[in-house]
Amino acid sequence: MPLGVSETAFIDPQGGNRGAIAALLQDALHLLLDHSTQAAQGSPLPPLQPWQLPTAIPQQGQDPALLFHHLQSLMAQSMNPAHPGYLGHMDPPATTLSLVGDLLAAVLNNNMLAVEMSPVFSRLEPLVLQELAQGFGFGAGSGGLLLSGGTLANLQALTVARNVQLPPVRTQGLGAAGRPVVLASAVAHTSWRKATMVLGLGSEALIPVATNDESQMDLGDLERQYQGAIAAGQRPFALVATAGTTVTGNIDPLPALAAFAQAQGLWFHVDAAYGGALIFSPEQRHRLQGIDQADSITFNPQKWLYVTKTCAMVLFRQMDRLQEAFHIAAPYMGRDGDWRNLGEVSVQGTRHVDILKLWLSLQHLGHQGYGALIAASYDLTDYLRRGLEQRSFLHLASGPELNILCFRGQPQGLDPAVWDDWNRNLQQFLLKEADCFLSLPLYRGSLWLKVVLLNPHCDRAILDRLLAGIDRYAALTLPS
Amino acid sequence: MPLGVSETAFIDPQGGNRGAIAALLQDALHLLLDHSTQAAQGSPLPPLQPWQLPTAIPQQGQDPALLFHHLQSLMAQSMNPAHPGYLGHMDPPATTLSLVGDLLAAVLNNNMLAVEMSPVFSRLEPLVLQELAQGFGFGAGSGGLLLSGGTLANLQALTVARNVQLPPVRTQGLGAAGRPVVLASAVAHTSWRKATMVLGLGSEALIPVATNDESQMDLGDLERQYQGAIAAGQRPFALVATAGTTVTGNIDPLPALAAFAQAQGLWFHVDAAYGGALIFSPEQRHRLQGIDQADSITFNPQKWLYVTKTCAMVLFRQMDRLQEAFHIAAPYMGRDGDWRNLGEVSVQGTRHVDILKLWLSLQHLGHQGYGALIAASYDLTDYLRRGLEQRSFLHLASGPELNILCFRGQPQGLDPAVWDDWNRNLQQFLLKEADCFLSLPLYRGSLWLKVVLLNPHCDRAILDRLLAGIDRYAALTLPS
């Protein structure tokens, strides 16, 4: 190493500093174990502390011991999704094999841009994703691509949909394409509006379709919105269904939407970022009926498969369309006859090796393991639902279809004008007094409490604590 | 855990399975150490083996011991950037603290989507990036955003540029915007063409400006291309300069391009994905003169700062423009008065915590460490350049400005029609007979050999081996 570079800055590929590196990584492992085996003792979402980390880049490198000292306090202040009371978002604790996968991916530092830069992983990813595509009922010729997060998976899908449906746009742009629009449920994820904005369609090109009481797309309104767009001179080219809405976890009527899309010649996408995990549940997978009619599907193992972030994918019924509608060559890369340079068909170029942790987690848990986790999660959902329904001052946003419950207090003894405040304070009370973190989404113009029963360490005792916390708060705040 | 889920699938937050988890992670650590401390013994780019990994998802979960057995062979077949003879791409071995950062990011599994999901990291990222922005000469009000790879950083920059320059596009789309176009060097990275395609401008909206013999943008041709676009009814709105071209590592004339962009009212972006590291070199940073005039800059620590993939950023001279021109709300997220939900201003939503490994690496190496690595890298570049110039059958593509040398054999004794084959075979010879991996880009219509002297384990002895390999190949293939 040149003078001024720490002896442990890199691992010597000749083994010269193995002892020092091993000691440093052991320290990291101890930090990891001490933190994660005591995660239940802290708060699911610790309060923000005054800022103490040094952010200035020092002239001389710092001793790792000092950095590890900072790391300890930084970890203690982080979101703590392994806490059994962390129930607020679709953000789970990690599978153990995800940690192994991320650690080994880091030391290998391969690049999903091209086969030459990831000879094993550029083959592993298409093979695993083809199997998952078939798990959704897609046939031969299907396949997929991992992307760094669900927003990018949706962006990738809509780019391909636009280029397939409006052929000159890929090379000549949207100038001559009229006013293309996309239809999606009013409660579809915010990334769809972002995608229409990024793609040059404009954020107003996402036409929201009204939902019924169960947060599912209303077919009558779909027909009205579609005809209205045509009448206004717009050009609908894609229909986005959701299998697992962000706030309430509901599923759009997939078979009817598939039929509508086919009749009107629309690209049919199913955003199953969350609900896609049901393919691992023999008891629940019927809820995804019709998804095999999609042209493309988003599915995020970073959610209900507990793989570390990021791990998200887009699957295509006809994988060839991706190549035809997207390919941008990278002439500085070598090529291999049989395998694709994935960076040439992706909105990303250089990309992290997310397939390693996904493959390891699927192998370690198997169909049976994931199926059992999903079943347990449905049991807890039923249990908590009954508890919530027993409390007359609470109101459920919709009938749960997955493992998500969304509710709010609408206590008759209080002025409806203060209900939002009452719920906001309830969320804080539950976090501080019951060690349970629920999120507080804005939904249908009001504040709600959202519970995601994803955490494998959650059990009925935690839910009893949550319900008792609600009762204590109600006793303190409601007229008796 | 439910029946059927492995006891080590997750870390018990109560510590119940600490022993088993510790043993499993120790096994992973041994794999890591055995691989990385012997990385110099293998090949820098091992040949592809017949496929042996199981990709089918098993019914019952597999024993980690079996998976670790597969991992060993999988690692042995991966791209090996830690090998001292890996010189082919801008893909380095990882800093040790990157490994620590990626491991701890995995166990925390926080999410850069929102402050609520990453309370510490959503504060750390803007602070560190603001300091880096100022390192490029930007003033108060500057800042930046990490993205999962340089292609996304470029996409983010061009989305903001488009929305700022063509105000109705953000909400109403490109329909009424005429034919917007972007000017960039003919050798700008392929991600710029991808960005114009994704953004709905069309892949033909990237207007290539010719380069001089040193692969730098030609100012006369820039003026011609700009006037030609105007005459054709197109609407140039951005100019992209490159500081470190992909194949030859050259730098466009930044001060002149900044002046041109300002005179014509164009957004000025500098793609310093590679060359941006020069801000850490007191001797070399003068090469970036003029970069402080940019509206936005791409800079990828995943390259010359040796941070694991992915770690890339876009920096804005006026950070407020990002909020104004991009913001898409996520109403299901909590908010904190002082800190931004980064997912609302990014083409990504859920995002990996890349700031942890970047912060740790910057703290561990410091200005001095990175400066010393860059200086050593320039020394090796000079050394190899002299060696290549001594061989009359070799021809350099351009005068090197960074640590990249691009050359090809044009032996006078051979028909020029076979030169491409001769160079292709030379690349394979060097890989097999000299354990040196050089890449083989297509550039100016011919095949070249590219050497990136980024590897901190490379030294003059390796370069002597490379030159000796070239001589042996020449002796075997050239008429004496």
Image (spheres, coloured by chain):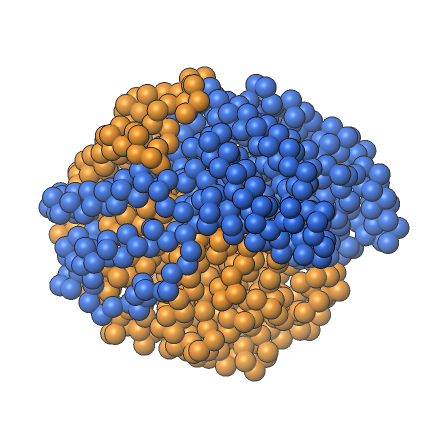
Chain colours: A orange, B blue
Q: Quadrant of residue B19?
A: top left
Q: Is residue A202 visible?
A: no
The total number of labels drawn is 0
Residue plotted at (45% across, 44% down):
B435
Q: Residue furthest right?
A: B231
- Please provide percent x and percent y for residue B258: 74, 32
- Please provide percent x and percent y for residue B397: 68, 41
User: Would residue A470 be found to the left or right of residue B168 on screen?
Assistant: left
Q: Residue furthest front?
A: B480
User: Would residue A315 be found to the left or right of residue A275 on screen?
Assistant: right
Camera-nearest residue between B265 and A443 = B265
The quadrant in which the N terminus of chain A is found is: top left
Residue plotted at (82% across, 46% down):
B225
Q: Quadrant of residue A290?
A: bottom left
- Please provide percent x and percent y for residue A439: 34, 48
Q: Is residue A24 above or below residue A205?
A: above
Q: Residue furthest top?
A: A59
Q: Quadrant of residue A247?
A: bottom left
Q: Is residue B87 visible?
A: yes
User: Would residue A286 be found to the left or right of residue A149 on screen?
Assistant: left
Camera-nearest residue between B269 and A29 = A29
Camera-nearest residue between B308 and A423 = B308
- Please provide percent x and percent y for residue B176: 76, 57
Residue plotted at (28% across, 48% down):
A100
Residue plotted at (17% across, 52% down):
B8
User: Would residue A235 be found to the left or right of residue A43 on screen?
Assistant: right
